[in-house]
Amino acid sequence: MTIELRQLRYFLAVAEENHFGRAAARLHMTQPPLSQTIQALEADLGTPLFQRTRRSVGLTPAGAALLPEARRILQQAAALPELARRAAAGESGTLTLSFVSTADYNVLPPLLREFRERYPQVRIELREATSDVQLADLMQGRIDAGLLIPPLDEKARTELDYMTVLSEPLVLAAPQGLKALRSKGRAAAASLQAVAGLPLIIFPRRIAPALHDAILGCFRDAGLTPSIGQEAIQMQTIVGLVSAGMGIALVPQSVSNLKRPGVEYRPLAAASATVDTGLAWRRDNASPVLHAFLELLRKKS
């Protein structure tokens, strides 16, 4: 049994008018085909929907139960064209976005705020993940896009597109009150030579090779070989270990927005390497929501 929207519209007109003649006039049709359609609907449902007399038409208990559901179904059907238009324009749907922990201190909050303001009907699913995990998820189609630290490996470059969103220098994160830094002002630049004796806390190279290599490159340019004391995959953990006096770290400048007791941030006296954060996505992903997100990002860059 299939109930058509046309049958529900006819039923609703008769129920609201309490009269077949007035309902037929409202529907711009003659009464006989209206009556036949209602009779066919009642036959399909196996129960009368109207109590008919010569002077009036009233709903049966079955008709009264059907009335609110018929209204709901017709309202939902009327909303379908607008729903489809919004989905095609990227104004509704779901965006699954992964991000590295460093993005939480720079590009992610303002980007999400502006996207939510423009597309309030879009549901955003956020997942914090390291760059290597994001690349695997993108290749498998488990996420729409990822804010990550490049580079993309050779296989990923054949299937993914990439856009640089931010480039920023590395700064020193050191335990507060170090004697080597005490003689300088709190905002003064620091040299790596002054803290070279302290253990270095760093991302594992397999997790973020570009960031790992940029950090070691700063020491190499200063003629130093650091002693790696700890490795951690979350920026919060790295800064927490610095706060605990476990060593120093070189972090992207925006991480200085992470205020942690016992940690001070200093720019480096020598020119430091820059670290990129960018967005990667599958080249064959035709999601209108993703492309609306990309359009916003391109306008901001």
Image: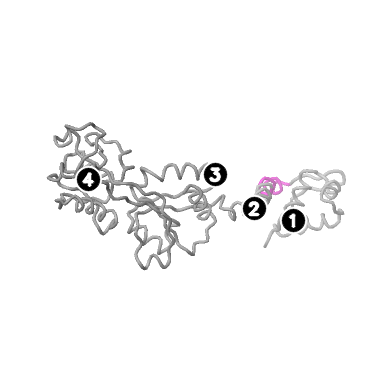
- Answer yes or no: do the residues labelled 4 and 3 have beta carbons within 8 Å? no
Frontmost residue, 22 versus 259: 259
Frontmost residue, 301 versus 283: 301
Disc number lying in front (1 or 3): 3
Asked if residue 182 is positioned above or below residue 289 in the image, the reply reads above
Q: Amino acid at mark 3?
A: Arg
- Answer yes or no: do the residues labelled 4 and 1 have beta carbons within 8 Å? no
Disc number lying in front (4 or 3): 4
Residue extent of the magenta highlight: 60-70
Q: Amino acid at mark 2?
A: Leu
Q: Which residue is mark 3?
A: 118
Disc number lying in front (4 or 2): 4
Q: Which residue is mark 1?
A: 6
Asked if residue 230 is positioned above or below residue 139 in the image, the reply reads above
Q: Which residue is mark 4?
A: 249
SS for callout 1: helix
Q: At 80% across and 43% down in the image, what residue appears? A: 17
Q: CA distance from mark 4 to mark 2?
A: 54 Å
Query: Where residue 262 sits in the image (x, y, percent)?
Result: 21, 34
Q: Earlier in the sequence, mark 2 or mark 3?
A: 2
- Answer yes or no: do the residues labelled 1 and 3 have beta carbons within 8 Å? no
**In the orientation shown, which residue stands out farthest toward the left?**
197
Q: Earlier in the sequence, mark 4 or mark 2?
A: 2
Q: CA distance from mark 4 to mark 1?
A: 69 Å
Q: Magenta span has 63?
A: yes
Q: At 62% across and 51% down in the image, what residue appears? A: 83
Q: CA distance from mark 2 to mark 3?
A: 21 Å
Disc number lying in front (4 or 1): 4
Q: Which residue is mark 2?
A: 80
- Answer yes or no: do the residues labelled 2 and 3 have beta carbons within 8 Å? no
